[in-house]
Amino acid sequence: MAKKKICIIGGGGHVGFPLGLYLASKNLDIYLYEKNLDICTKINNGKAPYYELGAKKLISKFKKNFIAGYDNSFIKEADIIIVCIGTPVDNDLKPDFKNFLKFFYFLKKIIKKDQIIFVRSSVYPGITNKIKNILKGKNSNLVYCPERILQGRSLIELPNLPQIISAYNKKSLKVSIKFFKKITKKIIVTSILEAELIKLFSNALRYINFATSNQFYTICNDFNVNFNSIRKSMMNGYSRNSNMPFAGFAAGPCLLKDTMQLSHFVKNKFTLGNASLKINEGLPIYIIKNLEKKYNLKRKTIGILGLAFKSDVDDTRDSLSKKLIKILERKKYKYVISDEYVKDKNIVSSKKLINVSDIIIVAVPHANYKRLKIPKNKYKIDTWEITT
């Protein structure tokens, strides 16, 4: 029996690439459909386009099983088409699906009746039905199966997380269950709307949890109390508080965006989500305002440890460190930046940053920062308590 050919749309992205790499390791033929030709070149040369734990080893070992390119024949020849296209919000934080839906109008022109379409992207509830209507008359084998991986650890999480699956017919449901059992043991079948909400609820819940800790942090800070001491005591022997995260920058291309998609779905009546946005996005200006109460920042150099949006990745999309930098630039305060993963001409080594800075803000808890020793004469803000 011939191997199924898999085409991943957005195959060079942070969702599509690790999925393709994992499937290639299962001896499947993978086409990574990617319009960024620089990313395609890297992948075809056996190099990961960005940092993903374990990718470097896998890509060299299973390079023969996949190819990256922007060739429509990839789509035409595939048995299964997996869509991993980004679904951003616009400047007003409203879902922007123009480019996402535009792809399906294009797909309708070339798709065959027996191909199966998996949608992995986070979507505003009702969008999967729109896709179904776009493809009506050409293909009805549509599956919504959202990804829930943690960027940077995708290859570890893919085989260990349950997979949510929803479909419009028995044929595509059967194919999708068989397919995802190659990846993970646990499959959860739901309706389309349930699957859409599961994904958005999952990310919104994490965003709200971070906002809760950040709100507690600001309360403690205003009353000169150490939040982490309180957090440890709250969690000590009391399991109901065991999932409380550290305070700190909570950002990136998923949590805020999906929280706002959910808010838009309920006509802006998602009170918790809207409040979480205000708290999390307001943390950089809160930190600067508090520093201004203590110091004349015109005479200080502020060091920012971490430019990525989260720990142990090289992705700076929607990073709150970048928002912090904009505030410093607007106020004409002097600053330096360091990051263990991000490549940028303005980045200095962590050693140099510590030497030249008067104030050090640990913006991202990269694992390597555990080895950093910051002198006592430097004022340090480390909500993660990762440095010494």
Image (cartoon, rainbow, N blue to C red):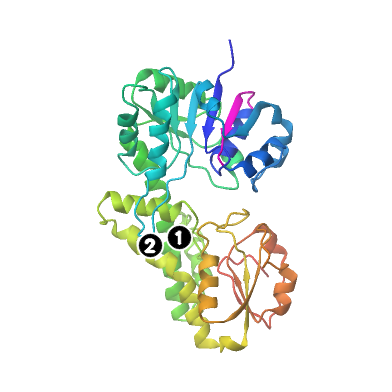
Q: Which mark is residue 19?
A: none
Q: Are marks 1 and 2 in contact (CB under 8 Å)?
A: yes
Q: Position of residue 298 (x, y in %)?
A: 58, 87
Q: Give percent across and percent down for residue 176.
A: 45, 24
Q: Which residue does the image show at 44% across and 37% down from the upper left?
A: 146
Disc 1: which residue = 210
Within 10 Å of the Cα at label 2, are there few (<14), some (14-19), or many (20+) other Cα atoms? many
Going by the picture, which residue comes out furthest to the top? 1
Q: Secondary structure at mark 2?
A: helix
Picture residue at 44% right of the left edge, 80% below the top: 222
Pointer 2 residue? 276
Q: Is residue 358 magenta?
A: no
Q: In this view of the protein, can residue 213 be seen by the observer?
A: yes
Q: Which residue is rendered at x = 46% and y = 75% of the image?
A: 286
Among numbered discs 1 and 2, the one appearing first in the sequence: 1
Q: Quadrant of the N terminus?
A: top right
- Mark 1 crowd level (few <14, some 14–19, many ≥20, 10 Å Cα): many
